Amino acid sequence: MSETKVCSRCGLEKPVADFYTSRRHKGYVQPCKDCHKKICSERYHKNRERILAQRRADRLRAAQGLPSLKREPITERLYKVCSTCGILKALDEFPVNEGYHQARCRACKNAMQRRRYEEDPSYAKEYALAWYHEHPDECWTIRRRRDARMRATCEVENSLTAAEWKEVLAKDGYRCHYCRIPYTKDNPATQEHVIPLSRGGSHTRDNVVSACLSCNSRKGTKTPEEWEEARAAFERIKSLDDE
């Protein structure tokens, strides 16, 4: 008589041939093969985005000659590997949600949100409006920070003239300094500070370039190095989505 075992999920008694052998312990796993496949399928659909991001990160690391994230040794708790770009970064470069650092770094997360906005602007606007009504205190804090930045502009060097601004536009060819899209009535030029005013920049000819509203908003208070990193992350995610 063949040996049998009761499945922990469906409760049916089946031959041990219908159970997978355990890699950690001697014997067999608790659920039968059919139930085990269902569990794996449910787990995949529940964590599909994270699993696909993990695979994309492994492909990037393999192209760079780096080991898989699953085999990445944990060296210091002050660092974390981004699941999207596969780069080891400091923990302060990862957004915090409910006390835990998220899997994606801040640059990759912003790039993915930008990609989602370009695909469906209406969804992003509805989400932002809902977030505004659900988090009035955070919105009030954001407005206070913006007011503080505006007050700070009155204290920095302010010598940009109208003639110099026209020279900036002509130098950029009446196109955005970053994305190179030409200016139109629906896409006007804005004054963008290379070194943000809130981080010690000045409102002078040497620190001002022309930028479209989209690039100006995306750059925000980033330095040129931080902005280039954010743009590179967006291009990486865009290329992965196009594969």
Image (spheres, rainbow, N blue to C red):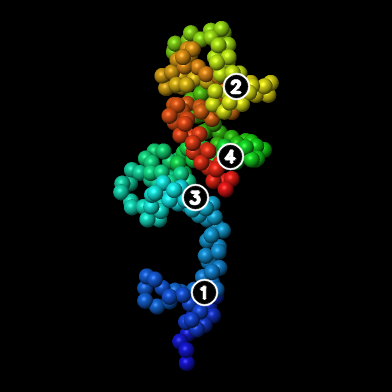
Q: Give above or below for 5 relative to 52.
A: below
User: Label 1 vs label 2: CA separation?
Assistant: 61 Å
Distance Cα–Cα, label 2 vs label 4: 22 Å
Q: Quadrant of residue 99?
A: top left
Compared with 130, 63 (above or below) is below
Rendered location of residue 161, percent (x, y): 53, 7
- What amino acid type should be assigned to the residue bearing mark 1? Lys
Q: Could you tell whether 129 is left or right of 196 in the image? A: right
For mark 4, what is the residue? 115
Q: Which of these two is toward me, 143 or 48?
A: 48
Q: Is residue 213 visible in the rendered structure shown here?
A: no
Q: Residue at x 65, y 40 (%)?
A: 120
Label 2 amino acid? Arg
Q: Which residue is mark 3?
A: 56
Query: Can you tell which of label 1 and label 2 is closer to the viewer?
Result: 2
Q: Which residue is mark 2?
A: 175
Between the C-alphas of marks 4 and 1, the distance is 40 Å
Position of 23 with respect to 115 (left or right) is left
Q: Amino acid at mark 3?
A: Arg
Apparent side of residue 131 relative to residue 202 in the rendered image (left or right): right
